[in-house]
Amino acid sequence: MEKILSSEYVTIGELARLTGCRYSTLKFYTEEGMLPFEQAEQNLTRRYKREESVERVAWICTQRKAGKTVPEITAMLCHAAKKENGNGQAGIAACPTEDRDGFF
């Protein structure tokens, strides 16, 4: 565990151990674009930034416990990312595109 705690990047299995969240749940969050990862070209292992991902998973779990749905959480993440970037673009996979009326 010390090695995991000192690593900058972790695998999804290591992230599951760190957060107590199920592997399948983390995989779902990843597939929904809520949990960003990096993937080296040489292999197919997804790597998650340890500190950022642990915080993100804790935040998502808090929102789920508060009764928020996955689409609501995704929208909150998109809004925060757009605000952070300052250019109106989120730059994360989870963000829906605006329709012609300007609504999601």
Image: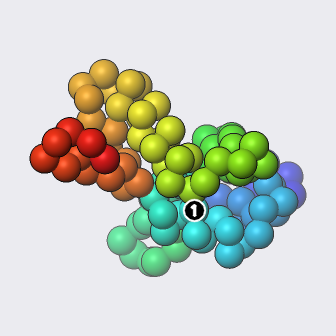
**Numbered label tally:** 1
Residue positioned most to the top: 86
Badge 1 element = helix
From the viewer's perspective, is residue 82 above or below residue 22? above
Q: Nearer the viewer, residue 29 or 19?
A: 29
Q: Nearer the viewer, residue 79 or 91?
A: 79
Instruction: Report whether 102 appears left or right of 18.
Output: left
From the viewer's perspective, is residue 17 above or below residue 42? above
Q: Position of residue 71 (x, y in %)?
A: 50, 54
Q: Which residue is mark 1?
A: 29
Q: What residue lies at 20% left-to-right and 39% top-to-bottom?
A: 102
Q: Nearer the viewer, residue 68 or 74?
A: 68
Q: State the image quarter where residue 78 is shown.
A: top left
Q: State the image quarter where residue 82 is shown.
A: top left
Q: Position of residue 70 (x, y in %)?
A: 57, 56
**Image quadrant in which the N terminus is located:** bottom right
Please, what is the three-letter code of the amino acid marked with disc 1? Tyr
Q: Position of residue 92 (x, y in %)?
A: 37, 48
Residue positioned most to the front: 101
Instruction: Report whether 17 appears left or right of 89.
Output: right
Q: Position of residue 35 (x, y in %)?
A: 54, 54
- Mark 1 crowdedness (10 Å alpha carbons): few <14, some 14-19, many ≥20: some
Q: What residue lies at 31% left-to-right and 47% top-to-bottom?
A: 104
Residue 48 in view here: no
According to the image, what is the colour scheme of the structure? rainbow
